[in-house]
Image: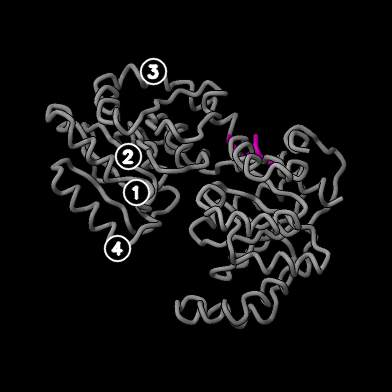
Amino acid sequence: MTDNFEQGKIDSFIMTKVLILFPFHNHNQLVDSLCDNLAKVGIEADSFDVVTWRYKKNSSNKTPFLLSILSPFMVIPKVRGLLITLLGKKVILKISENYEIIDIHFYSAIFDEIISELKKRKKIIKITIWGSDFYRATNARREVQRKFYQEVDIIQMASRQILTDFLLVYPELTNKTGIAHFGIMQFDIIDKIIENRNAETCKIDIGIPPDKIILACGTNGHDAQQHHLILRSIDQLPDSIKEKLFLLLPMTYGGDKKYFVEVKEKLVSLGVPYKLFISPLSVVEICKLRVISDIAITIQKTDAFSAAVQEHIYAGGILISGEWLPYNKLKENEIFYIETTLETLTETIGESIMNINKLKLHCDSNRVKMGLLSSWDAAITSWKDVYNKIGC
């Protein structure tokens, strides 16, 4: 079954109603783009954030009365926690009544009890593994998940590497696993930015000197991004190189105030000009950061080929990544990037800056290759085929 989900094409039209459940508001736009693109291929898909109770519909399903009354109170943190504890399960099950397929994204403990209840109600259940929901799970948590993985109808991964690693832990689940990766809507926005404004103009828009080499350090505010190690490596560069640099640190989600303060203190002592982004940015603002970044450094502890990394590549930047990160898809598609160890990071950054024009020539074909790999036009068929197959 593993390969059939990628390769099989179902030509007959089947109206399937899907509800996507997910637990984090900062990925609304990614889930929304999935639902919007499913609608284009005849799949009705709505989404519900089980933490904020945001219910976004492409279908004509009515919002349950209980949710319409209580959802305005979810903006109050203390009330939100109480409502989720007392009524979260009831609200999710009520919303789920009108759907054939329930697709649980980023599987965490909040869904354990829900899965058993949905099975009792004869729902088709799919789990979509994003990456860190598998990689960062403890051994104890993985054993709890094993029971529920055995109950659901299909488990879908965002990449073949995740599938390979997943089956090393759960070999008995081979016959109910598949692959269907997310398309990246930001590619279209990056295209428009590049078409209308060059990188130097975008730098001026953001208040960055146009003559500086821009280094993007990490992609979010989690300490797993290892900002300290990146900044330490930059600090060890010769002054003649450091004076050419401007650092970007997008830390708009994840992390905590203590960690932000630590990173900022290190930035101040470094003496290299920088911009640290903590407040939320619009999608267009994020895409502008991708366009102006000459070099993107990602040495996070784990990653599942995140959209942010792919956006940097698509925008034409040079990617420096930790050699332990599972970016085999880049190699398989002959997409240029540079691997590094922690021990050689300073040397890798220095050599990349000294040879930046030559390296950017190697990146020239990355945009086309990345588009063929990760645009929604390329990705949506595999999602449609999976839903239609399990919805028959």
361 versus 367 height, above or below: above
Whether the residues at callouts 1 and 2 have beta carbons within 8 Å, the answer is yes
Q: Is residue 78 part of the magenta span, yes or no?
A: no
Q: Which residues are magenta?
A: 374-380
Q: Amino acid at mark 4?
A: Lys
Specify the quadrant of the image occupied by residue 216: top left
Look at discs 1 and 4 and give the one toward the viewer: 4
State the CA–CA distance, disc 4 to disc 3.
Answer: 39 Å
Q: Which residue is mark 1?
A: 250
State the CA–CA distance, disc 1 to disc 2.
Answer: 8 Å
Earlier along the polypeptide chain: callout 4 or callout 3? 4
State the CA–CA distance, disc 3 to disc 1.
Answer: 26 Å
Q: Is residue 378 part of the magenta span, yes or no?
A: yes
Q: How is the structure coloured here? A: one colour
Q: Which residue is mark 4?
A: 257
Q: Residue at x 29, y 43 (%)?
A: 248
Residue placed most toward the observer, 123 or 68: 123
Name the spot of residue 46 as percent of width and height, x first: 68, 60
Whether the residues at callouts 1 and 4 have beta carbons within 8 Å, the answer is no
Label annotation for residue 361:
3
Q: Which residue is mark 2?
A: 216
Label annotation for residue 180:
none
- Secondary structure under tag 3 reads helix
Look at discs 2 and 3 and give the one toward the viewer: 2
Whether the residues at callouts 3 and 1 have beta carbons within 8 Å, the answer is no
Q: Please identify the dominant SS of the magenta region.
A: helix
Q: Amino acid at mark 3?
A: Leu
